[in-house]
Image (cartoon, helix red, strand yellow):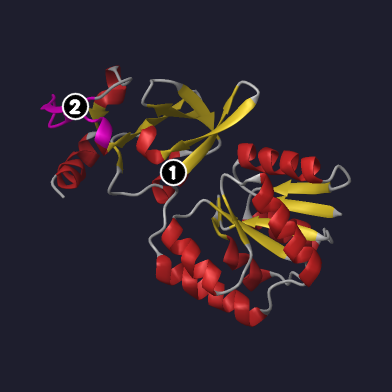
Amino acid sequence: MTVIIIEDEKLSADYLARLLHKLDPKIEVLAVIDSIEQCVNQFSNGLTADLIFLDIHLADGISFDLFNRIDISTPIIFTTAFSDYAIKAFEVNSIDYLLKPIGLQDLKRALDKFAKLNARPNDELLAQLKSAFQQAKPVFKNRFLVKMGQSIDSIPVEEILHFMSSDGLTFLVNRQGKRFSIDYQLEQLESLLSPDMFFRINRKVILSLKSINKVSIYTNSRLIVQAPSLEGEACIVSRERTQDFKSWLDK
């Protein structure tokens, strides 16, 4: 069997590939694609496989937009890190999906189902899924996959202190103060995180509400935040974000 993985988080893509090979060493991953634009280019140039694993939220938009731009006749298994209430909508519409972090038995079930059906979702079911997704908004990530040595762990957003951009990389910092590199830019994270839980205080930091110990007045009409594992300039709320930050705290 040949497979294409469409996923914008490298750790998730690598993890899925390893699970597939564990279930069946003969499965060949032909390509890993991380954006809608890349999908359009590669599929238009003849890329095809027996099965596609498609993440719902990609770096440059919602993957449903892909079906408005090109025709895909390959069977699809959707993958998602969305919250449970959105998953209920997917169940109703009988489209197969895998909830991240993907379990081995769940993956086997999905592969067995598609082997039996050997068909892609038809246009009517795809339209129902798009409608269910839209009705379930807003939907935000519940967890992030991170690499710990040779293992992969899943960190719930409730355990995250903040996200920080540094030297061209983005890091997740958990409640134990440990930093993990993740495959997202802060601009992407702003749309993936609940605005009730997280706020971007400056160009380098997205902060969790639960991690804030104290907020004080700083120079030039700015604010400074006291929070674990955060220091220096990273603690300062930028001038242009100060008023919105106050409103966020006052919700």
Q: Earlier in the sequence, mark 2 or mark 1?
A: 1
Magenta residues, start to end? 210-226
| Residue 179 location (% of width, % of height) | 46, 23
Q: Could you tell me if residue 168 is visible in this image?
A: no
| Residue 37 location (% of width, % of height) | 65, 56
Tell me the crowding category of disc 1: few under 14, some 14 to 19, or many 20 or more residues within 10 angstroms, Cα based: some
Circle 1 sits on which residue?
189
* Quarter where residue 157 is shown: top left
Please name the residue shown 10% across and 27% down the image. 217
- In the picture, which quadrant includes the N terminus? bottom right
Tell me the crowding category of disc 2: few under 14, some 14 to 19, or many 20 or more residues within 10 angstroms, Cα based: few
* Quarter where residue 138 is shown: bottom left
Circle 2 sits on which residue?
213
Indicate the secondary structure of the residue bearing disc 2. loop
Horizontally, residue 120 falls left or right of residue 129, namely right
Horizontally, residue 221 falls left or right of residue 194, namely left
Amino acid bearing label 1: Leu
Amino acid bearing label 2: Asn
Q: Could you tell me if residue 111 is visible in this image?
A: yes
Q: Which residue is more in the foreground, 240 or 165?
A: 165
The disc at residue 109 is: none
Residue that protrudes farthest toward the right in the picture:
26
Please name the residue shown 77% across and 56% down the image. 42
| Residue 94 location (% of width, % of height) | 60, 72
Mark 2 → mark 1, Cα distance in angstroms: 23 Å
Q: Is residue 4 magenta?
A: no
Q: Which residue is more in the foreground, 239 or 115?
A: 115
Q: Which residue is more in the foreground, 116 or 138?
A: 116
The correct choice, above or below, for 139 with respect to 105 in the image is: below
Q: Viewer-nearest of labels 2 and 1? A: 2
Horizontally, residue 144 falls left or right of residue 27, namely left
